[in-house]
Image: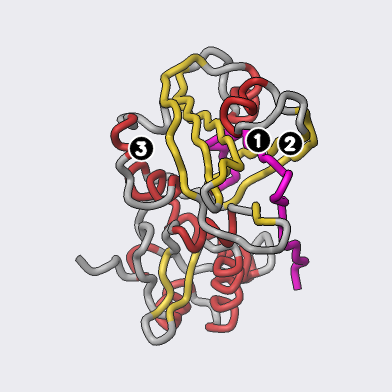
Amino acid sequence: MSPPSAATIFRPISPGTADAPLYRVVKRSLLRAIESGRYPAGAVLPSEAELSAALRVSVGTLRHAVDDLVAEHILVRRQGRGTFVALHDSDRFMFQFFHVERSDGVRHVPQLELVAFERVRMDEEPAQALGRKPGEPAFQIDNRLLLQGRAVIHDRLTLPVLLFKGLTEKRFRERTNTIYHLYQTEFGITVTRARERARAVAADRSAMRMLGIASGAPVMEVRRTALTFGDKPVEYRVSTIDTAHHEYVHLLSRPA
């Protein structure tokens, strides 16, 4: 099935009524089309000429908007094939959302072990992070991540049931790609970015059991709220990281 034409999706933009730089108005229009599902994950966008004609903006303005969305990993350009709505996969996960590597700089894709999958009532902390009410139904998922065969990270995920209706332990365990790929392809939820807070803590009993470390050993705790379009929270995750041989490394950049 061919994607919808730009003329049927987009309304022309009048530069004189734009409430922001024109490329940002174009960017918002593209985001709305992606968020609505008119151009789902993996779909190819119409050509630059078709989009600019439908929006009645210059190709340069359109390209500026697309450049922003590519930088934010929402779109991806493929040489000779066009511009596509980005799919979550292991490469994107390692580049954008996984920041743990060995102290000598070696980084590997983690091996993930599902430890527990439960339906619970949401505690106050995840409820606040997710904009929900304490006591709302949620899925609570515990994963252990191994690097080079060594348990290094314990992840506890909290997902609102209302956003992930139909999720089961079987579906989660038998997914063929990353967790965020599962959200995107089976629930229509694209994680675009995440807000994180990190602090040093002492290992508790849970860390002892999950990571095989001594009580009181120093670990890093990272609290992540995963966000979709419009910065809507969809997942709350607490990661406990054994930093004896690994470090949290994040490449920072400033807008041009």
Q: Quadrant of residue 22?
A: bottom right
Query: Is disc 3 surrounded by few (<14), some (14 to 19) or many (20+) residues within 10 Å?
Result: some
Residue 27 placed where, x, y %? 56, 64
Alpha carbons under labels 2 and 3: distance apart: 27 Å
Residue 53 placed where, x, y %? 44, 79
- Whether residue 85 sits left or right of residue 130 in the image: it is left
Q: Secondary structure at mark 2?
A: strand
Q: Nearer the viewer, mark 2 or mark 3?
A: 2
Q: Are marks 1 and 2 in contact (CB under 8 Å)?
A: yes
Q: Secondary structure at mark 1?
A: strand
In the picture of the structure, the residue carrying the numbered disc 2 is 219
First to last magenta residue range: 230-256
Q: Secondary structure at mark 3?
A: helix
Going from the N terminus, do you reach mark 2 or mark 3 first? 3
Q: Tell me the residue at 43%/79% (across/down).
A: 78
In the picture of the structure, the residue carrying the numbered disc 3 is 172
Q: Quadrant of residue 62?
A: bottom right
Q: Is residue 132 above or below residue 247?
A: above
Q: Quadrant of residue 3?
A: bottom left
Q: Tell me the residue at 37%/52% (across/down).
A: 177
Residue closest to the eye, 104 or 137 = 104
**Which residue reaches farthest left?**
1
Question: Which amino acid type corresponds to the residue marked 3 in the rendered image?
Answer: Phe
